[in-house]
Structure formats: C-alpha cells, structure tokens
Image (cartoon, rainbow, N blue to C red):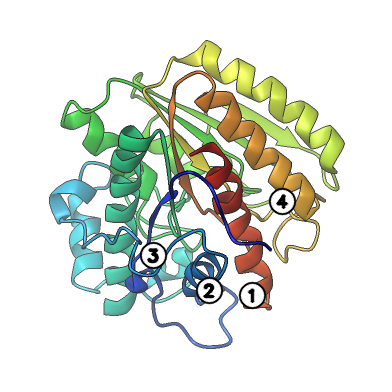
Amino acid sequence: MPPYTGAMPLAVVHNPLFTAELAADHRFPMPKYAAIADILLREGIVSPGAFHSPGPAPAEWIGLAHERAYVDQVFSANVPEAINRLIGFHVSESVAARSRHACAGTVMTARLAFEHGLACSTAGGSHHAKRAHGAGFCVFNDVGVAANLLLASGEIDTALVFDCDVHQGDGTAEIFRDEPRVKTVSLHAEKNFPARKEESDLDIALPDGMEDEAYLEVLQQALTTALDLIRPDIVFYNAGVDPHRDDRLGRLALSSEGLEDRDRRVIGFFRERGIAVAGVMGGGYSRDIMEVAGRHAILHRVASEFV
C-alpha cells in the first residue's frame, strides 16, 4: 500500500487502552485495535504522535445511554456473572477502562467530524450493549453514549446511526427506540446473532452468502431511504468488517474490494450532502490479527480520500 499523500491528514482517534487484557485464546480478537493503529502509522495515514487520544468517559456521560446501576457495576469491575456471560468475557478493570476510553473516543470522533467533516476511531461500534446491560462482546454502547451526550449538550439536533456490521445493531435500536431525534439503520445478516432482533427505524435483513454486487445495490437503496427518515447533523457509521466472506462470525460473502466500495459509497453519499460522518470499527473476527486489522483499516484508507 503506497503512503497516503492527501492534502490534509484524516483525524483518527486512538488510545492504547482500547486494547484490554483478555486470554490469548479468547475468540474476541482484542489485539486488533493496536494492530489497526500500527497499520495506519506504517502506511502514513496517521503521522507519529498525530493520533487524537481520549481520556476515560465519566459515569455521567455513560449514564445517558445506560442504567446507572449497570454503569457503576462496570466502573467497579463488579458485574454480575450472568451479565459477564451475556457480554462474552469477564469485565475486569482492564475491560472497564477500555470501555470508558472507547466511549470517550467516539465522542471525540464525533466532535472532530464536526470540525473536519469526517473523522474515524480505531475502536467503537459496540452496538449490542443495551440500557440495562452489555451483550455480544459489547460493554457500553459508545455510539449511544456519544449521540445522547451531543444531544444533551445542544451540539446536535439530530443524528443517524448507519450500521453495516453483519450483526443487527439491537442495543442501539433499543437505546434510541423512543428518541425521535436519532434514527437507526441496520444492514445485517438475517440469520446471524442476535437471535432476537430489536426494531430499528430501518432494518434490512440480508440472506446468507450475499456477495458484493447484490449487497451494494441494497446499500444504495438504504442510503436514500435513510435520508427520508431524518436529515441528520451527523452520521455515526458502523463500518464492521464481519460481512467479509472469510470472517469467522459472518454469514455474508463480501470481498475486501466490496468492503472498500461499501465504505466509499457510504462516506461519499453523506459528505456530498455536507453531513458530518464519524466512523467506528464494529465487528471483525479472525484468528489472524493482522488480517482482520487490515480489513478494518480499509475504512481509514477510504476516509483519507475525502479529507
């Protein structure tokens, strides 16, 4: 990959604490977050020392999206074992710190997107976390936190969550179910996790094995329909790479080129209309950390074309 030579650098949010301590054989590929940052530095998309680094989100921010009792359990690393099982790993102090920094990272990404038109995190997109508890490798719903905070502060009046992770954004849909200022769109594999889906403002359930051409056709229709739902001040784009044909937990069949075209179409659609875009990582699962990190870095490579 040749070095990035754009007119100005892409604003990228990263903190080493995005990587928590998990067992080396855990099926959640936690080391990918550090690997994404390494790729961006190596390719020149981000210069050394140029990452925007968030601190930990305070409980008051996270409590805008989650029940305070659950927030306190996470902050004290004292989450009931039943909820740890729903999440898929034990919420240790390291995991709690990661979750707080990831939430603050998505807030920072949104604010940078307003400043520059577009910004991306190297984490975020934890869309299965609901108000009362986490689930599906998601402790806190960072997009839920960020959108609620920006609404509460008056920084935005409206927001759109455009979620292309292969799994339905059920937690995000639940958090914003009764919030008319935020609309949620989810393109996901119909037969994938979660078994029980929530109702987004627009759900597009896709059949197993869908490939690039068919997916991109559906995507284009979804983009147009999304703007019929709301005229957002900002779009939170969940660019999960688990629709990839080689993903361990996906059921779709996109190529790496298909993911690249997807990201280019989503970012281009909203930026052409003057709408700020905050990109977050979402899911991506492989035993080969550099392989999955490379897929995630597609978002940053594509986003660099628009700055």
Q: How many numbered discs sit on the rendered protein?
A: 4
- Dot 1 or dot 3: first in sequence order is 3
- Dot 1 or dot 2: first in sequence order is 2
Local packing at callout 2 (Cα closer than 10 Å; few below 14, some 14-19, many 20+) is many
Position of residue 245 measured from the top left corner of the image (x, y, whole percent): 80, 57
The kind of secondary structure element at disc 1 is: helix
Select label 4 or label 1 by which is in front. Answer: 1
Q: Which residue is mark 3?
A: 83
- Which amino acid is tagged 1? Met
- Which amino acid is tagged 2? Ala
* 3D distance between C-alphas at marks 4 and 3: 27 Å
- Residue 290: which disc? 1
The kind of secondary structure element at disc 4 is: loop
Do residues under tags 4 and 1 come within 8 Å of each other at their CB atoms? Answer: no
Q: Which residue is mark 4?
A: 243
Residue located 34% across and 62% down the image: 50
Q: Which residue is mark 2?
A: 35
Local packing at callout 3 (Cα closer than 10 Å; few below 14, some 14-19, many 20+) is some
Position of residue 2 measured from the top left corner of the image (x, y, whole percent): 66, 62
Local packing at callout 4 (Cα closer than 10 Å; few below 14, some 14-19, many 20+) is many
Position of residue 268 measured from the top left corner of the image (x, y, whole percent): 59, 30
